Image: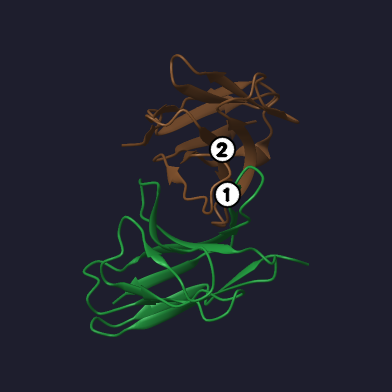
Amino acid sequence: AQKITQTQPGMFVQEKEAVTLDCTYDTSDPSYGLFWYKQPSSGEMIFLIYQGSYDQQNATEGRYSLNFQKARKSANLVISASQLGDSAMYFCAMREGIGGATNKLIFGTGTLLAVQP
Amino acid sequence: DGGITQSPKYLFRKEGQNVTLSCEQNLNHDAMYWYRQDPGQGLRLIYYSQIVNDFQKGDIAEGYSVSREKKESFPLTVTSAQKNPTAFYLCASSIRENTGELFFGEGSRLTVL
């Protein structure tokens, strides 16, 4: 069965420093997609970045990059130059299969990131 | 602007009452989803729908019901059979193609008194 594990309940980082949020996954499907979402205190889920299992390059979106290590089944999120507005809950998620009729995602338990001035 | 609208944002209910959460999208997405979020836990899938008049149970469907009479709308009813309904509920939608990114509403917080 597919599973997402985020082992860091909470983390602190100094403003302007980089931080890595860990995510490991388990699936027997060779085709899958990995996602990171940000949830501020207001509650909405904001999509950050996506990595497909067949993508050769690590995904990047502005200050966000995904450190994809397929053999280790890890998909860590790296946030460079942290800002106070990055303080939020961060969720890793996975979808088995690519291009299917539905996009059911399973989510990890999240990591609460606090950026300190 | 295109997006997903959930209402109400906050809802209080007495035990034994059914309550319906609204979810409307104008993104022209085919698929819609309902997730439940509890403190310290990730999101868990309640129900999802690929097309109008069709929906499937997710991982925690017991005590919930849905309908999909229109492409734009996917209301969730929390019934009195749901043993622990106090939670944050998130509605999402997606298109079939592309990466499969989910677009979320702002959520509805249900408290049972």
Label 2: element kind: strand
Q: Give amino acid for label 2.
A: Trp
Q: Which residue is mark 1?
A: A40
The disc placed on residue A36 is 2
Percent of width and height locating residue A58 = 65, 21
Crowd rating for badge 2 (residues with CA inside 10 Å; few <14, some 14–19, many 20+): many
Q: Nearer the viewer, mark 1 or mark 2?
A: 2
Q: Name which residue lies at 36% across and 72% down.
A: B111
Q: Residue at x 48, y 29 (%)?
A: A11
Position of A78 relative to A101 (above/below)? above
Q: Are marks 1 and 2 in contact (CB under 8 Å)?
A: no
Q: Nearer the viewer, residue A17 or B87?
A: B87
Q: Quadrant of residue A1?
A: top left
Q: Quadrant of the C terminus of chain B?
A: bottom left
Residue B110 visible (yes or no):
yes
From the rendered image, report the letter of the chain displayed in green: B
Considering every residue shown, the one lying at the far bottom of the view is: B17
Residue reaching furthest top?
Answer: A71
Say which chain is brown: A
Disc 1 with disc 2 on a shared chain: yes
On the image, which quarter does residue A63 sit in?
top right
